[in-house]
Amino acid sequence: MRILFNLLPGLVNIISGLFMFISARRMAESGANSFMIAATMTIWALFYALTAFGLGFVLTKRNAVKILLAGQTVLLIALFGLLLMPSVTAQYVWLCGTGIGTASFFTSFQAVVKLFGKQEYALESVARNTAVYTLSWSFGLATGPLLAAFVWGLFSPEDGWRYCYMITIAMVLFNMVSLVLMNRFVKIRLRELGEETENSAPPEVPPEQRTLPDLIIASWGAAVFAGCVVAMMRTYIPDYCTKVLKWDTYKQGMILALFSYSQAFTGLFCWKARRWPYRPWVFAAAAICGIIAMVLFLPVPPNWHICLAGACLLGIFYGVFYFTSTFHALINPVKSARYAAGNETIVGLTSTLAPIFGGLLAMQLGPRFPFQLCIGLIAGSAAFFTAGILRTKPAGK
């Protein structure tokens, strides 16, 4: 059952990748301008951020699965709307629902993911669950656009996108059945742990964790910088590759896929992490990989094979960043639901603002400037995280 539950983040991000790709491409084919195309992600991200922020006040391990089911219901309605209403401008309405549905899933799922391990708060257990979770959703994010392009290509340009949405609807229905099973599992686990009611005793924390600091502020600060890099590059690189480099769809697809697949397997390689999320050197090393990646994209024109290497290096930075951010949210025995909501709020806000700023800066300061800016942002994320560690003393000391 644990394997089934860990597949769900991947499926939801396959769905996300599908509707993001389809909505942007349909808008582009209609002749819409760049602002209207970018607004498809902005609308989703805005409602994602608002939903995640709101859930931070009400989410607990005991109500998480109910919120998951409610969110999937909203996502299902939104996908039916995208399928049945062919108007490209009507997409904006239904993308609001996709933002609510996906935010409800990822925020609430993190509240219960620790229950999949034998020891809820042991360092090894949290690291393992975080690694598998990062692998699952990252793999889904990489696979979604590829699946959309493949399925759409099998049918006529006018109707192929409809079959993609039919697939997403089937996935949501599968998720909802799985969540019913998860609800039973979570209730049993909470009963075993003595946490089935609001008045239950606080969870038992392993002795070694009691001396470790709460680094969520350092993690959130780094996430603001790194999240801007993620959101900006995911939207700007396709634009840069199309308008400046004149690369074909195959080359662009390989670059974008390598980002997420490298991110996914980097997250998995963090499986054995114990205390290094509390030390700055791994995050700093990943930041160096990200900076090198940006440098590899700077030459005009760059070598495509070198850019593939840059995509892998940037994926390594993404993977370590997302693993670290999720780990420090989940490791807290009392506030993990609120911390997870904070993480997802930052994801939504950076996805709302960074792509727009990236495009405007490229127009005003040249096509290479977003890469130069991201070098500074990556360095800033590592500096903020390091400073946060140095300022924070272990609990009890």
Image (spheres, rainbow, N blue to C red):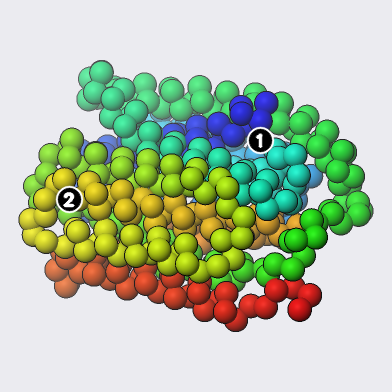
Q: Which mark is residue 306?
A: 2
- Residue under label 1: 69
Q: Provide residue 201's location: percent of width, then percent of height.
A: 91, 54
Q: Measured along the vertical axis of the image, is residue 154 above or below residue 362? A: above
Looking at the rendered image, the quarter that the N terminus falls into is top right
Amino acid residing under circle 2: Ile
Q: Closer to the N terminus: mark 2 or mark 1?
A: 1
Q: Quadrant of residue 286?
A: bottom left
Residue visible at 31% across and 53% down in the picture? 313
Front position in the image: 306 or 14: 306
Amino acid residing under circle 1: Leu
Q: Is residue 2 visible?
A: yes
Residue visible at 24% across and 70% down in the picture? 372
How far apart are the alpha carbons under marks 2 and 1?
44 Å
Residue visible at 12% across and 39% down in the picture? 248
Q: Provide residue 95's location: percent of width, then percent of height.
A: 44, 43
Mark 2: give few (<14), some (14-19) or many (20+) Cα within 10 Å.
few
Toward the bottom, the furthest residue is 391
Q: Quadrant of residue 350?
A: bottom left
Secondary-structure class at tag 2 = helix
Q: Provide residue 85's location: percent of width, then percent of height.
A: 39, 31
Looking at the rendered image, the quarter that the C terminus falls into is bottom right
Point out the frontmost of discs 2 and 1: 2
Q: Which mark is residue 24?
A: none
